[in-house]
Amino acid sequence: EGVSLTLARAPNEGYFTPAEFPVTTTAFRYRPGDLEAWPELAGNRIVMLLRWHTGRNSMVRIDAESRTVHLQQPQPGLVVVPPRYYVENLEALLDAPGEWHFAPASGKLSFHPPADLPDPNQARLTVPRLSHLLRVSGTADRPVRNLRFYGLTFEGTTAGGSALTLAYAHACEVVASHIRNVAGEGVRLDPGCYQTRILENAITRTGGSGIVVAGVAHPAKWTDSIRETRLTHNTLSFCGGAAISDHDTLFSTIAHNAITQNLGRTAISVGGWRNLEEALTGGYRVEYNHLYQVQECADDSGAITTSGLTHDSFVSHNLIHQVRRGYFNDNVAIWFDNMSSGWVAENNVFYGLAQGEMKLCAANLVDNLYRDNFVIEPPAIAPEPLLLGVPDLAATGLAIRSEATGSDDGFLTGQYLVARAELKNRGATGVSTVHLFVDGRRNATQKVASIRGNDAHVEFRLRFATPGLRRIAIEDSPTQTIDIRGEPWSVLADELALSESVVPAGTAITASARLENVGPREATAAVALFLNGEAAESRRVTLAPGEAKPIAFQLTPAPGRYRIRIGNTPESRLHVYAHRAVALTTRPLDTHVSATAGPAEFQVDTARNRYRIQASGTDLLHAEDSYGTIYLRQGVRGNFVSTVKVVRFSERTHEWFRAGLFVRNDLAQSFGAEPGSLGSVLCFTTPGRTGLQWDEFGDGCMHKASSQNHPRTEPYPMWLRLARQGDRFSSAISYDGITWTGTRQTGPVPGLAEVVDLGLAAGACDQRAYAVEFADWTLEVEAEPTP
């Protein structure tokens, strides 16, 4: 009783994937052993997870000889990304405990009892017949008021409805009830609901969303609005849509809920997808929710997703962990989706994120705030199911050491020290503020995220310009006294930055820092640039009391490895390597076109160093991976710099047709029926933009991208430069072939090989073919390892 049984399916868990990329919307080839030419296909369903939607279709024929399944109707999206899929509702698939099948033609009901039900005759089996169980419907001028539903069970509906629906209902409550095993939505609030409270309920196994608050962006009259809804202290699991969906409402509070095993695209969805400035949306409080093991079937999503223009709306103090990896696109903890504006996301805690903490789509951070959010290591002790309090931290084990030497004594003026303490959280999971005290006064504060019952730590960096004894404490830790020795400093240098950290010899490097006069009177100091501990250049700088200003040095060092600092800054590392030119005109070049970019045409004129690629595609980003490439197979080892001139695009080329320099471990292994090769980095331009994108998460496709508009429309010819620097890359552009601007850098690229493919590539996003011409492709590689 209370358990939802499984319609006979294959595979029994998880999904199949096609044997190869589908080339038609009506059929695809399956892998050996996945499907069979079952003689009876009546009533079957095939469920396909595609980009942004789930496709539901039927199989009309299975050809065992060619291993091809033919679909009843064309399936949108099938030739964009290969699906994950399962088949169900065939008697031949009835092979696992808990599965069932019904044949309408014969009236035969088959049931494979679960292991914990030895006698199926003792089971209480029900088949839902209703799409709605209870509706509470008032009118705008005569709303229903003050209804209370306590301790009830709503169970068993067909798809297309809600177990419980309220409309034009004021000050009603649903408390401590069970909503389970419904094929549609759990609880739905329609327009006209005011001060509804949905509290302490257990909602599980809904085909649609668990709780839906369905407002109207532009209601005809104020009585049609939904406002002051409270959804708190509920537990939601296995919801087929968003566990909680609240759109186009005012002053909703979604707090202290626990959401797990969510099967929909997002666990909490708030805002208004089609909002304009005058939309009736705002005052959201999404806080102290615990979301974990979510987005099992999702792609391109966030555990908490915002959308639309709003005001006074906060996503804060939520705990989000074990967010599943997307198959085609990336899944993150918080997603500012379509037209998000006016949202504040702060003091949230994350761990176990396979692909990242935050992303934007048709939204910008200039319109929203994302601050003081924390990604931490998975805790030894699991967090509490419901977040009901605040952290209570005890600080112990204060340790102070020199950042430069690691020593816990011999502290010098002008050098950074690190004060560290262990923190035990005796309260609830969350974010708290920790204080550093120097000589009995609060010197600095830092926010720390911690999980109930677990240890955390905090570190403060500090330094002193004058010698003497200092008393240090963190929160309630015992105070330690340290002796600072050395000459007093009036000018301190900080914030050292190098324009590049790995460069070929002959490259000009800029080293910059920030100088500050920390003394009570005007100071003049000689500030030096140090290479490997020796002064290479010095300048005299005069600063007024409290004044700060930047300083920068230009250097072009010989090949070698350097420790660099300015004044008394901490050191940074620089690697300058000898290099040699690779004659690309004498090297054999290969071509490849991915499954979604064909047909493609390639023209290679190595004698003139000119190239042309014509390709189609659905997108050269994410798992669509649409590109044609002319490339040097396994031809580049270690660090390198490659440049190319983009001569022109064909007429009326789409503004997002990407073309440029492409690196991958194996450029011939694009994302098809299986994930693509690792190590992808693309320095690209389009008719309107230029940028850099890469495989940030090591999942065989590129999700991370950074780009900007050209200063004028189609400024061609233009030049692209891509440089490898260990496990990172940088890019730059030039509009004259001399002056390089727009420098961008990747983070570490997971799984990047020592020897990679390098090529020219291009791909479209609208399934139309366009062309691009390249010229003057160059390659400089590291001559030999620098000791």
Image (cartoon, rainbow, N blue to C red):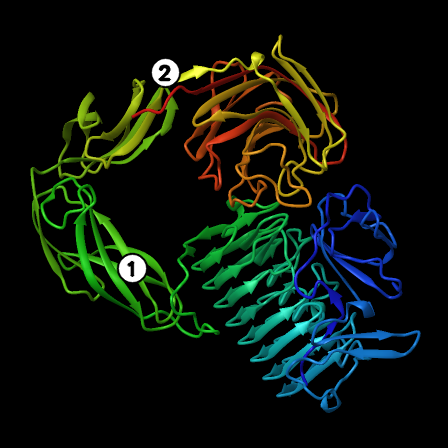
Where residue 309 appears, as percent x and y from the top left, is 61, 53
Disc 1 residue crowd, few under 14, some 14–19, many 20+, Cα 10 Å: some
Q: Quadrant of residue 394?
A: bottom left
Q: Nearer the viewer, residue 549 or 757?
A: 757
In the rendered image, the quadrant that contains the C terminus is top left
At a point 46% along the width and 29% down the height, the residue shown is: 730
Against 734, is 16 above or below?
Answer: below
Residue for badge 2: 506
Residue 183 appears in view: no
Up the image or down, 465 lies above or below 509; here it is below
Left of 126 or right of it: where is 684?
left
Give how far across and how far down residue 565 sits, in percent.
Answer: 24, 31
Task: Give me the residue at 18% from left, 36% from top.
Answer: 545
Q: Residue furthest top?
A: 607
- Relative to 521, say whether 479 is above or below: below
Q: Quadrant of the N terminus?
A: bottom right
Dot 1: element:
strand
Q: Which mark is residue 457?
A: 1
- Identity of the amino acid at label 2? Gly
Q: Is residue 532 left or right of residue 350?
A: left
Residue 601 visible: yes
